[in-house]
Image: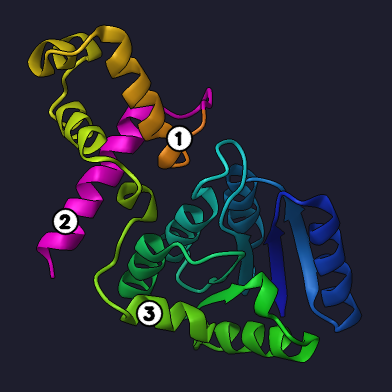
Amino acid sequence: MRTVIAEDNALMRDGMAALLADHEVAVLATVADAAGLLAAVEEHRPDVAIVDVRMPPTFTDEGVRAAIAIRSAYPETGVLVFSQWVETVYANQLLREHPARVGYLLKDRIVSTAAFLDALRRIADGGVALDPEVIRQLLSGPTVDAGLARLTPREREILALVAEGRSNVAIAADLHLAGRSVEKHVTAIFTKLDLPPAPTDHRRVRAVLRYLEGRHGLSAQ
């Protein structure tokens, strides 16, 4: 079996590579970010890509978005999303659009090397490997974006206006707020949506995409 590993934690990345090598799994590349992952998959076309959910530059959802892109562009390459938590919005999208050669395991719940290797083999063979907690959260009800759920009514109102293309100045005029107050609300929105400043991402656009995805998920129920 041939793999690539995308994990920003160097200790975990190197440890995983050593573990796989000890069990005769070829590790073709180890990378620390989503861009490196996509380049490695394009170059090596592995059987399975092992992907952490949160990686540079924003440490939000780069990994799982890269996993979706890999399954779309390289159907013979499986992906094992390996995370500390369940990103239900993207996990649901990944499984809905690409229901084969996919795995989603929680780091803290891997109990043995044998279970991890078995999951990799199932994915490489065209199957699915899901942690029971992932299944429970996906089946427990409508997909809810935890970040959006943390927003106050005022913050949701402001985010809706941002989605309409309004500037902070226009929002302040519409809601009869001080411009500084709107800026603080927008900053709070970015914080609650886990969208830190990054030179390669437009936080305002990403916040709007999260808002629209949340609305679509509710309307689909």
Q: Secondary structure at mark 1?
A: helix
Quadrant of the rendered image containing residue 100: bottom left
Name the residue that disc number 2 marks. 216
Judged left or right of residue 8, residue 63 is: left
Q: CA distance from mark 2 to mark 3?
A: 21 Å
* x and y percentages locating residue 99 in the rendered image: 38, 79
| Residue 81 in magenta stretch | no
Q: Nearest the camera: 146 or 31?
A: 146
Whether 63 is drawn above or below 46: the answer is above
Assign the C terminus to one quadrant of the image: bottom left
Visible in this render: residue 199?
Answer: yes
Q: Secondary structure at mark 3?
A: loop
Over which residues does the magenta segment extend? 197-221
Assign the N terminus to one quadrant of the image: bottom right
Q: What is the three-letter code of the residue carrying label 3?
A: Pro
Badge 3 density bin: few <14, some 14–19, many ≥20, Cα 10 Å = some
Name the residue that disc number 3 marks. 99
Residue 191, numbered label: 1
Residue 29, numbered label: none
Whether 192 is drawn above or below 7: the answer is above
Q: CA distance from mark 3 to mark 1?
A: 32 Å
Q: Secondary structure at mark 2?
A: helix
Badge 2 density bin: few <14, some 14–19, many ≥20, Cα 10 Å = few
Whether 23 is drawn above or below 36: the answer is below
- First in sequence, mark 3 or 1: give its number: 3
Visible in this render: residue 45?
Answer: no
* x and y percentages locating residue 59 in the rendered image: 57, 43
